Image (cartoon, grey):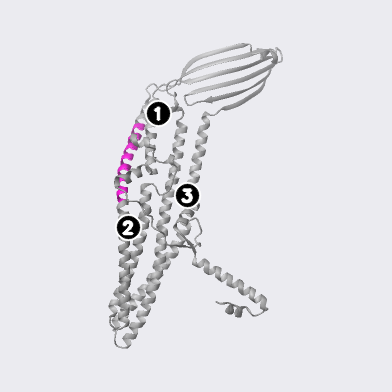
Amino acid sequence: MNLSQVVCVCKSGYDERSMKLRCLFILFVLQAAVSALAGQEIDLEAAIDMALRQNRSLKLAAITLESREIALENTRTAFAMNIQPSGEWSRTGDGDRLGYGVNASRKNTWGTLAELDGTGEARSYDTAADYHRNGVRVRLTQSLLQQFGPLINREPVTAAESRMMAAWRELELRKVDMVIRVVEMYEELFLFEKQVAFNEQALVRLEKLLRLTQGRERQGRASRVDVLRVDLQYGEAQSRLNQSRERLASLRAEFADLLGFGPDQVFVPLSADIPEVDELEADSAFAVAMYNRLDFAQVMQDCEDAARGVAIARKNLLPDLKAIASFERFGEGDNFSESRSLDKDAWFVGFTVAPADILRRNERAALRQAVLNEATAQETKVILNFALQRQVQQAIAAYERARADMPLAERNYRLAESRAVLARRLFEMGKGDNFSVTDAEDGLLQAQNRMLAAQSDAMITSYRLLRTLGVLLECPEILKPRAEMISKGL
């Protein structure tokens, strides 16, 4: 609709100026609607960036990681300074009692617990003299066997750190999977955009061919069979176009959801360059994957955790023996001034053993289970090691095959296009038959589909190879397999 047509529609009841303003507004709305229908152009890099920032499933994974970080901070408080004030007041039949004090304690990873107490007590009696007592006590408790050393005492923190690292790796692996998913859907969307365009062009050509064949039939230069063949091909082209449009609309909604938008947002993918991957031998590629794959790093950490679990289970077979030493300075008397002199002292040294089953049945069962857990982790590592070698070999083979197929598919498409053009021209000049044209159109359609599929496959296999090598996205070095873990075979 041009401006003059809109003016004609809007001229009733308005003066010239108001009509122009209203018409300009209508044109603006129409242009906005056409722009929204056409969609927003987007390249692959921008699509990946949007998905990594806005995808809702990634946000949930990030929340899980934050929860693990909070849990880690909570376990670390076990080795922080702990200060606890106390107070008490009571009354009995013969008088009142007031108690007060403060306790400061701290535990270290070697199993040492240091405590400092400051206490006070005041008692008043109806029939006797008052009593006051104040004191300061230092108390040390040292585990000697079962609970001695960082292995046991730091285990809650170490386990929380392991869980946080696992959640962090899971988030990074989900990001990698998200990139692959975006690339796959981007290529599929781009493919169907092209297929719709190709199908529309084919429909126009077949419509022209159908009219030409019908005219030849009336002239007696083509048979009814020729008309029916072209008409059938024309109907199939219409059906393919409708199916392609329907699938394209569905893909647009899925792609928008993947990027964190509503289903009404329309994105139009642009042509993307296929990443070049340096040629790698299988052995060197496997080494790259071993030092970069986060799932391999997680298996290595699981082996390390399992080995630590065995060591802890062996330590739990020992008795829980502790040494205790305390020293107190205190004062007491009939009033507060006498009690605060702290002129008396008392000390204590002793040993204590926590009660436990002398046969250690539960602890021995836990040790056997820990050994089985370590064996399971080691077998999982071996399985993943061979699987990783196989994945690298398959990814390289798929990448090389796709790169070789793409120029062949493009060449075949150009040949099929030239054949279709020549067949149409010969038929229009009366030097070719109808069957040659329809057969060439079928061949062109197949060549178009194979070319689009080959280009898409080359793009996807390139990104999959990068994922297999573990270099698709940059991630913190702390998450990658450690060289010493790999060298030890953990």
Mark 1 residue element: helix
Q: Main secondary structure of the magenta part?
A: helix
Which residue sits at x=45%, y=56%?
45
Which mark, residue 401?
A: none
Gap in Å between the C-alphas at discs 1 and 3?
36 Å
Which mark, residue 312?
A: 1
In percent of width and height, residue 95 lies at 69, 17
Question: Magenta stretch?
Answer: 369-394
Would residue 258 be visible to someone looking at this image?
no
Q: Earlier in the sequence, mark 2 or mark 3?
A: 3
Foreground: 308 or 482? Answer: 482
In percent of width and height, residue 194 lies at 40, 66
In percent of width and height, residue 326 lies at 54, 16
In percent of width and height, residue 273 lies at 40, 58
Q: Are marks 1 and 3 in contact (CB under 8 Å)?
A: no
Q: Are marks 1 and 2 in contact (CB under 8 Å)?
A: no
**Residue receiving disc 3:** 58
Left or right of residue 16: residue 139:
left
**Foreground disc of the pair 1, 3:** 3
The type of residue carrying mark 1 is Ile
Left or right of residue 124: residue 252:
left
Image quadrant containing the C terminus = top left
Mark 2 residue element: helix
In the rendered image, residue 44 lying in the magenta stretch gets the answer no
**Foreground disc of the pair 2, 3:** 2
**Residue receiving disc 2:** 403
Is residue 294 positioned above or below 189 on the image?
above
